[in-house]
Image (spheres, coloured by chain):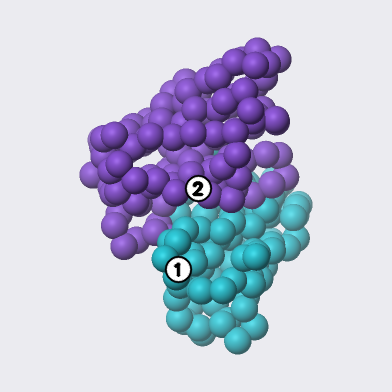
Amino acid sequence: DGGITQSPKYLFRKEGQNVTLSCEQNLNHDAMYWYRQDPGQGLRLIYYSQIVNDFQKGDIAEGYSVSREKKESFPLTVTSAQKNPTAFYLCASSKRGSTGELFFGEGSRLTVL
Amino acid sequence: EDKVVQSPLSLVVHEGDTVTLNCSYEVTNFRSLLWYKQEKKAPTFLFMLTSSGIEKKSGRLSSILDKKELSSILNITATQTGDSAIYLCAVEVGGGSEKLVFGKGTKLTVNP
């Protein structure tokens, strides 16, 4: 079955540590996205990539980094510079030219202790 | 700054009720408006609206866009407990930075 796989589902981190969240898709989609969701908030865009080896900052990119070396993969690193990293992180993908219809992974919940 | 506002933020109804969820937007380069349902973790796509006044329907759910009023509504008739979820409205913006801007969502609780 085609879909998006995020891992890990739950992650605990100590302050000052970097952590990388994995996102893999086998839908053959060109575009991939990372969103952050806090309680009572909508989804806020962190980074997005419309093609391999290219990505753009979203609305809340500070303290995060990404790479897009393969079409299928779009890992997100939450660095120690992110002041409030505890959140639910969602990865999504879409077909080229169809930005609106996103397919989401099941999310990763990061808790900083 | 592009903005999407949903109302109400929270709603509790009884099974069988009809509900209307609202979404308004202010964006610089509108392409489409979308509705998603988030039950537990992954949001799932419901509707994409691009033209004003044309209703999209799927079972008990329907939605319509009003470009003059910069708004959309999502109707759910004969609600069931399985409709309990967060309903997210998003606007696709173009102009070189194709992306979605999301509202905060409406949390719908349907009680038996």
Query: On the rendered structure, is A80 left or right of B14?
Result: left
Q: Quadrant of the C terminus of chain A?
A: top right
- What chain is colored purple? A
- Of A42 and B22, which appears nearest the observer? A42
Task: Residue B68: name its quadrant.
Answer: bottom right
- Of A67 and B40, which appears nearest the observer? A67
Kindly identify which chain the residue marked by label 2 belongs to: A
Kindly identify which chain the residue marked by label 1 belongs to: B
Query: What numbered label is drawn on residue A57?
Result: 2
Q: Label 1, on which residue? A: B94
What is the secondary structure assignment of the residue under circle 2? strand
Same subunit: marks 2 and 1: no
- Of A112 and B90, which appears nearest the observer? A112
Residue at x-position 48% and y-position 64%: B92
Q: How crowded is mark 2: few (under 14 residues within 10 Å), some or many (20 or more)?
A: some
Q: Quadrant of the N terminus of chain A?
A: top left
Residue at x-position 52% and y-position 20%: A19
Residue B49 on image: x %, y % = 46, 72
Residue at x-position 70% and y-position 30%: A83
Residue at x-position 64% and y-position 72%: B26
A21 shown above or below A38: above
Q: Which amino acid does label 1 sit on?
A: Gly
A39 shown above or below A30: above
Residue A35 on image: x %, y % = 53, 43
Q: Which amino acid does label 2 sit on?
A: Lys
Marks 1 and 2: in contact by CB < 8 Å? Answer: no
What is the secondary structure assignment of the residue under circle 1? loop
Query: On the rendered structure, is A51 left or right of B11?
Result: left
Foreground disc of the pair 2, 1: 2
- Of B25 and A76, which appears nearest the observer? A76
Task: Identify the colour of chain B in the image.
Answer: cyan
A18 shown above or below A97: above
